[in-house]
Image: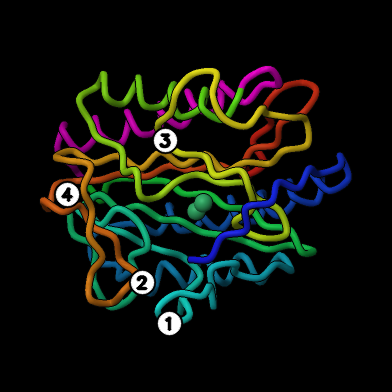
Amino acid sequence: MSWERSIILKSPAEIAVMREAGRINALALEAVRGAIRPGVNTAELDEIATEVIRKHGATPTFLGVPGAYPYPKSTTISINDELVHGIPGKRRLQEGDIVSVDCGATYEGFVGDAAFTTGVGKISAEAQRLIDVTYKALEIGIDQLHVGNRVGDIGAAIQRYVEGEGYYLTKEYTGHGVGRSMWEGPQVPNYGTPGRGIPLKVGMVIAIEPMLLVGTERTKVLADQWTVVSADGSLTAHYEHTIAITDNGPVILTLP
Ligand code: MG
Ligand code: MG
């Protein structure tokens, strides 16, 4: 995926539009979450997200994202060992799977980007713990989004917590600034050194997205040239919100 590294601060009016993009994206993800059950295929879930996004006058951000070939769907749906960028299709969810859904909505030119992981039917205690730690890692990252902190504080906090829980974080895929493009600066790794990196400012809008692996930090890309899996086949999980840094601290934009 191509990246733009420039950091573009947003006005309160722009953040209000981004809040609407984020809200629409959250509604799409909620609709998908409600449809997740054993037997549903991932293309059907993608269609649900697409419908919600379009119904609210937005467009699916992921559709056509450049890569080895343009991304063909509105969501990425990644199952079990698939960490990110799984392409929706005929695969049917099974009882005990864990599924990560990532989605973007563009509204009046601005993007909302968010993801969640959930279980399909009854899942193992180990899988549930992975999901819970991933969500908590997202919350810990968001807590760092205050003026006075630097980008390194975000990754350092996430890394300290996740590694303390015995899990691994990919170093190949990161969080990022969000605006009219899904990828603006700064790049926001899920690892780092406290007090290092770019200072956080009011008006920055950032996607924080911890991507956890059970076995090792190593990943590989499947033959479809999009799907990223854990190299050892172990379980993975992913959560993401788009958050604005305001005078009053972090405000999550990707909530319904
Ligand atoms: Mg995303
Ligand atoms: Mg993202």
Please tell me which residue is depicted at 36% across the width and 26% down the height of the picture: 159
Amino acid type at mark 1 = Tyr
Between the C-alphas of marks 2 and 3, the distance is 26 Å
- In the rendered structure, which disc, 4 or 1, sits on the residue that comes first in sequence? 1
Secondary structure type for disc 1? loop
Which portion, as a residue range, is magenta?
A: 122-149
Between the C-alphas of marks 2 and 4, the distance is 19 Å
Task: Determine the main secondary structure of the stretch shown in magenta.
Answer: helix
- In the rendered structure, which disc, 3 or 4, sits on the residue that comes first in sequence? 4
- In the rendered structure, which disc, 3 or 1, sits on the residue that comes first in sequence? 1
Residue 190: give its label. 3
User: Residue 30, can we see it?
Assistant: no
Amino acid type at mark 2 = Pro
Residue 69: give its label. 1
Q: Which residue is mark 4?
A: 96
Between the C-alphas of marks 1 and 2, the distance is 15 Å
| Rendering coords of residue 76 (x, y %) | 41, 63
In this rendering, the answer to whether 232 lies above or below 214 is below
| Rendering coords of residue 139 (x, y %) | 49, 26
Mark 1 residue crowding within 10 angstroms, few (<14) / some (14–19) / many (20+) = few
Please tell me which residue is depicted at 45% across the width and 58% down the height of the picture: 32
Quadrant (top left, top right, bottom left, bottom right) of the C terminus: top right
Q: Nearer the viewer, residue 105 or 172?
A: 172
In this rendering, the answer to whether 55 lies above or below 234 is below
In this rendering, the answer to whether 60 lies above or below 21 is below
Between the C-alphas of marks 3 and 1, the distance is 27 Å
Amino acid type at mark 4 = Gly
Residue 88: give its label. 2
